[in-house]
Amino acid sequence: MDIYDLIKDEERVSFIGMCKNAGKTTVLNEVIKKLHNNNESILLTSIGRDGEELDLVTNTKKPEIYVYKDDYIATARDLIKYCDITKEIVESTGIYTPLGEIIIIRAMSDGFVQIAGPSIATQMATVCNKFKEHSSGKILIDGALERKSIATGKVSNVAILSSGASYSADMEKTVRDTAYTAMLFSLPEYKLKLPEDFNRENYSEKYYIIEENTIKKTDKKIELREVWAKESDIESIFVNGALSDAMINSLLLSNAKLEGKRLVFFDGSRILIKYENFEKLRQRGLIFSCIEAINIVAITINPFSAYGHHYDSEKFLAYMQKCTDLPVINIESNHRG
């Protein structure tokens, strides 16, 4: 299936990378080109900075982002001078970053751009809404490293996950972790109603009991091992933030009754535990759910590594296809599966 067919009916698309040099920018450029060929304009921004000629992590040459006349971009003011296009400033958003205020500009010619967008999801949603006041084009959000949660349903409809040999010299690890990430993003949604006063100040504890689809405050600090150590009527726990391996070690070593119990997260990006530990808990009956799912529509792969340990292209494609039910696209050879 062509990558355009996967996103043509979606209003907002996010691009997520497993690592630097996973081929995400190449995928983004391919999507922009295909939309242009179908006479569709775009509205482009990013979470963090992207589009620079030199990768700031690996010091290697990377693809630049190319846009076309009548496309719109939202970028930090300090980067506008590096955009190789004739441009029209459309709106100042009032959202500030270390590189200046986020400005919406219209491309009056084709060319390369550098973008640095908002850093949090609520700001991104604001920018996307402002975009729509100027154009009916498709919104494309270029994700930054370690900011995968920007692709949740509150911000975008679907996401494309890019992975490649730069992630690890071990192809099996790259495939396993990529498939695991895609699976976490698509965990079943749980309709949890957060209180109107929900914020870090009012709700600072790590775990909260869920009752009647809302979280309950208690005077006693909750520990997963203890709350499920014996037969318990408590079925679901909300995890306020990320969950690491260190946080579940005691639960793994305990005899806690986990059959039918549930952990609920904001989204799948908050689950930081190793695949092996995730599976151990699932095999004991623990259910993982999230408030906001991230709808991954495809995985793209890049067999070339910025560090020199390249993969066999055909083996990489075949192994990734074996480990996921999602469409897998080899962006280097344009071989689709």
Image (cartoon, helix red, strand yellow):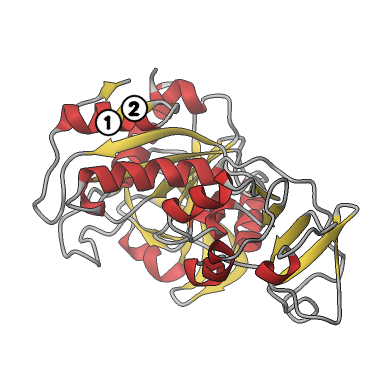
Residue at (45%, 47%) from the top-left corner?
Answer: 181
Residue at the spot of label 1: 319
Query: Is the C-beta separation of discs 2 and 1 under 8 Å?
Result: yes
Q: Identify which residue is drawn at 82% across, 81% down.
A: 220
- 177 or 102: which is nearer to us? 177
Give the residue type at disc 1: Tyr
Location of mark 2 (residue) = 322
Question: Residue 164 lies in what quarter of the image?
Answer: top left
Furthest-left residue in view?
308
SS at mark 2 in the image: helix
Viewer-side residue, 174 vs 232: 232
Which one is in front, 44 or 315? 315
Where is residue 122 drawn, in percent x and y? 66, 61
Relative to 183, say whether 2 is above or below: above
Q: Position of residue 182 (x, y in %)?
A: 47, 41
Residue 329 position in % (x across, y down)? 32, 28
Q: Looking at the picture, how far across and down is residue 269, in whole percent?
A: 53, 55
Vertical comparison of 307 with 331: above or below: below
Position of residue 242 relative to residue 277, above or below, is: below
- Residue 259 as seen in the image, left or right of residue 23: right
The amino acid beneath tag 2 is Lys
Distance of label 2 from label 1 (alpha carbons)? 5 Å
Number of residues whose C-alpha sits closer than 10 Å to that of mark 1, classed few (under 14), some (14–19) or many (20 or more): some
What is the residue that sits farthest to the top in this orientation?
1
Classify the position of the C terminus by image quarter. Answer: top left
SS at mark 1 in the image: helix
